[in-house]
């Protein structure tokens, strides 16, 4: 269940949590053309620090641009708005959800030229997303949205029906999370995560071909690994590569770095959380909690 906080930022003003409402004839609700982000902030010695805020705001603008939405705020204004929202709610750690929608005023598919654009920012405490250190996943029968049906690397609300269907399918059978393939049978991503494998002490992850989300955690893990002199390869992967991996893990703002112990009932590696994952996870958690000066530019402090 959502844990309420005090205030939600709505178009430049704060309103009470319960008052951030929309009209039932909001076009983005009907057609799915809203752009949103998921961002985490962590407690540090210098107060709450928002992880890679600038990159998340850049992605929000990219996502909205693909369907020609014009966000009526600058990137800097939204960076400041996120900081304000974290401060006003006085929580130390949690999740941030900015969303830009087409609001009430027009209907039908022409609304994108006519309806007003509204931006909302909410924050709330949110702990471990999958609730486990190591998860059992299953390949979904749904493939990831086809890159010729939509602009698949944008974070657009409507895309998430694909994630929801895949999740419902595998959760019905008792798995913790789904894995989706692309239309060519390559590994795409999870419903809300990017996938990494460890093989012979190297990291391997599917390439960005505008078919999967360019995860900000994915990018962070690649940079951290390279700094630790771990080889990183971006290439197409098949299911058998995952079955035969030494370690596998998901990355994402919600799941952070979460070990995958089984795929399709096949145990990966030793079935225990691997050495490389442990190392990357420790480094990641140190960075987000402000304990590694080298990555200080990834943190935006709320105060
Ligand atoms: N893929 C999908 C489909 C997602 O929804 C997410 C979560 N935003 C990710 C990957 C991971 O992206 P990030 O690390 O930026 O949260």
Image (spheres, helix red, strand yellow):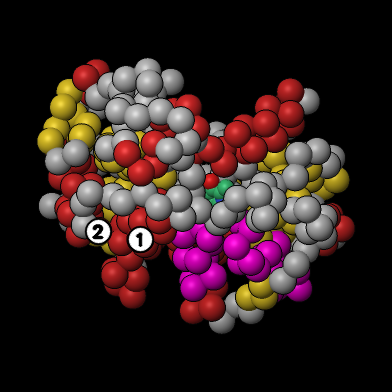
Residue interval drawn in magenta: 197-224
Depth order, front residue of 236/68? 68
Q: Residues within 10 Å of mark 2 (few under 14, many from 20)?
A: some
Distance of mark 2 from mark 1, alpha carbons?
A: 7 Å
Does 192 sit above or below residue 23?
below
Is residue 190 toward the left or the right of residue 225 in the image? right
The magenta stretch spans residue 205: yes
Along the viewing direction, whichever of 91 and 113 lies nearer the viewer: 113
Q: Which mark is residue 58?
A: 1
> Based on the displayed image, in which of its 4 quarters is residue 178 positioned?
top right
Q: Secondary structure at mark 1?
A: helix
In the shown orientation, is residue 26 left or right of residue 74?
A: right
Q: Position of residue 237 (x, y in %)?
A: 78, 63
Residue 245, disc: none
Asked whether, in this view, residue 147 is left or right of residue 282, the answer is right
Where does residue 18 sit, x and y in percent of width and height? 24, 18
| Image quadrant occupied by the N terminus | top left
Describe residue 65's horizontal placement relative to residue 264 as left or right: left
Q: Disc 2 vs disc 1: Cβ atoms closer than 8 Å? A: yes
Residue 75 image label: 2
Q: Note whether 126 is above or below 300 in the view shown.
A: above
Residue 293 screen position, x and y as percent = 29, 72
Q: Residue at x 85, y 45 (%)?
A: 266
């Amino acid at each position: 269940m959502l844990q309420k906080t005090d205030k939600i930022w709505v178009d430049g003003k704060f309103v009470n949590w319960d008052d951030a409402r929309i009209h039932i004839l909001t076009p983005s609700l009907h057609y799915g053309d809203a752009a949103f982000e998921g961002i985490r902030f962590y407690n540090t010695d210098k107060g709450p620090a928002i992880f890679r805020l600038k990159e998340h705001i850049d992605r929000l603008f990219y996502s909205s641009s693909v369907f020609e939405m014009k966000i009526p705020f600058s990137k800097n204004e939204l960076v400041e708005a996120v900081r304000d929202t974290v401060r006003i709610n006085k929580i130390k750690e949690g999740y941030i959800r900015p969303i830009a929608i087409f609001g009430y005023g027009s209907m039908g598919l022409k609304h994108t030229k006519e309806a007003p654009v509204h931006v909302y920012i909410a924050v709330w405490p949110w702990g471990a997303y999958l609730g486990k250190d190591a998860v059992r996943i299953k390949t979904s029968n749904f493939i990831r949205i086809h890159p010729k049906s939509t602009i698949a690397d944008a974070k657009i609300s409507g895309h998430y029906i694909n994630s929801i269907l895949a999740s419902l399918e595998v959760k019905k059978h008792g798995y913790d999370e789904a894995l989706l393939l692309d239309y060519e049978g390559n590994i795409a991503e999870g419903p809300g995560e990017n996938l990494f494998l460890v093989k012979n002490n190297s990291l391997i992850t599917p390439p960005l071909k505008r078919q999967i989300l360019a995860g900000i955690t994915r990018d962070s893990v690649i940079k951290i690994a390279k700094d630790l002199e771990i080889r990183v390869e971006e290439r197409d992967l098949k299911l058998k590569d995952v079955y035969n991996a030494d370690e596998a893990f998901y990355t994402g703002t919600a799941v952070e770095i979460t070990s995958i112990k089984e795929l399709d009932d096949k145990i990966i590696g030793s079935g225990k959380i691997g050495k490389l994952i442990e190392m990357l996870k420790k480094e990641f958690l140190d960075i987000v909690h402000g304990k590694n000066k080298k990555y200080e530019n990834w943190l935006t402090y709320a105060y």
